[in-house]
Image (tube, rainbow, N blue to C red):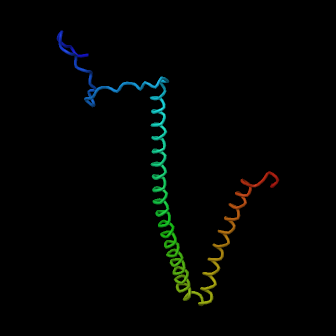
Amino acid sequence: MHDTEPGLPRAPDLDPLTAAEPEAPPEDGTGFTALRDEVAALVEDARTYAEAEIAFQKTRAGIAGKRAGRALGLLVVALVLLHIALIALAVGAVIALAPLVTIWGAIGIVVGVLLAGVAALVVLAAGDGRMLAALFGGEDQP
């Protein structure tokens, strides 16, 4: 409230943020217009938030997809290089063993060691497979 001298007209109360007179509440007889406007604004804000969240998740999924594809490509190249390295190791082992035993003996030794390694890996994988079958199988399995 402004202090005024007697006889002078009183200045209207102004909103300090907008320097305008405050809005009068709507006179519709029900009193629910402001509540309806607030709910409509809330619904619009929720819709805007949902649209922004969907756009963000689409962008994030696109970036993740590109990165996953790149990682998969790099993993394939790494496995190819590992395969080449193991072939070179096998050939080198045959060449190194050839003077000690005949060339056929060296090939037999290298192939035998590789097949023994394969057999050991298959046995371990089968054990893991049986464990998974027991974990996720029905109760009728022993």
Q: Nearer the viewer, residue 32 or 99?
A: 32
Q: At 48% from the left edge and 65% from the top edge, which residue is drawn? A: 71
Q: Is residue 74 above or below residue 133?
A: below
Residue farthest right in this picture: 140
Left or right: residue 108 compared with residue 50: right
The C terminus, quarter of image: bottom right
From this view, report whether residue 104 is shown above or below residue 34.
Answer: below
37 to 14, vertically: above or below: below
**How many numbered dots are placed on residues in this image?**
0
The quarter of the picture where residue 23 lies is top left
Residue at horizontal 48 percent and vertical 23 percent from the top = 29
Question: Residue 107, position in %: x, y?
Answer: 61, 85
Say left or right for 139 vs 62. right
Comparing 39 with 49, the one in front is: 39
Is 70 located above or below residue 114 in the figure? above
Give the x, y percent position of residue 48. Answer: 45, 45
**Closest to the observer, 31 or 128:** 31
Q: Residue at x 62, y 87 (%)?
A: 105
Q: Position of residue 66 (x, y in %)?
A: 47, 64
Residue at 52% x, 84% y: name it. 96
Q: Nearer the viewer, residue 30 or 63?
A: 30
Image quarter where the N terminus lies is top left
Q: In the image, 105: left or right of 142?
A: left
